Structures are given as structure tokens and as C-alpha cells.
């Protein structure tokens, strides 16, 4: 990947569970897609938070 943008992605589930990831992405939407993909099958996604950290 040619991007230098680092994002913190928090995938929140319906039961209060969440997964916290750091991903390298080209945009906030790309980071959101990556986080959703990483958490797929592990929880029922309620919402996703994305923060740029670098």
C-alpha cells in the first residue's frame, strides 16, 4: 500500500463488545471498510468509529 495514513478503527457491536484496530488506509471510508472486514463474523456491527492518528 502506498498510503502513509494511519487510522484507529473501533468496531462497536450490538452487545457492547468492540474491536479496536490500527490500519493503514487511503481515506476514512477505506479505514472503515477494513475495520468492518476484520471484525466480520465476530460481532453484529452497530457502528464504526474512525480516527486519523498519523
Image: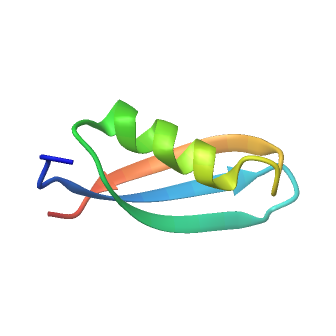
Q: Nearer the viewer, residue 10 or 3?
A: 3
Q: Position of residue 38 (x, y in %)?
A: 60, 53
Residue 34 left/right relative to 5: right
Q: Position of residue 1 (x, y in %)?
A: 21, 48
- Here the colouring is rainbow
> In the image, what residue occupies the spot 63% across and 66% down?
19
Q: Looking at the picture, does residue 31 appear above or below residue 38?
A: above
Q: Residue furthest top?
A: 29
In the rendered view of the protein, which quadrant contains the C terminus? Answer: bottom left
Residue 42 left/right relative to 53: right
Q: Position of residue 23 (x, y in %)?
A: 36, 59
Residue 26 left/right relative to 34: left
> In the image, what residue occupies the spot 48% across and 45% down?
34
> In the image, what residue occupies the spot 60% across and 44% down?
37
Rendered image quadrant of residue 22: bottom left
Q: Nearer the viewer, residue 19 or 41?
A: 41
Q: Nearer the viewer, residue 54 or 2?
A: 2
Q: Residue furthest front?
A: 1
Q: Position of residue 41 (x, y in %)?
A: 82, 49
> In the image, what residue occupies the spot 28% across and 46% down?
25
Rendered image quadrant of residue 51: bottom left
Q: Residue furthest right?
A: 15
Count of residue discs: 0
Amino acid at each position: 500500500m502506498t498510503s502513509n495514513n494511519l487510522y484507529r478503527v473501533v468496531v462497536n457491536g450490538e452487545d457492547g463488545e468492540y474491536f479496536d484496530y490500527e490500519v493503514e488506509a487511503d481515506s476514512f471510508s477505506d479505514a472503515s471498510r477494513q475495520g468492518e472486514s476484520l471484525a466480520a463474523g465476530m460481532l453484529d456491527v452497530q457502528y464504526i468509529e474512525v480516527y486519523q492518528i498519523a
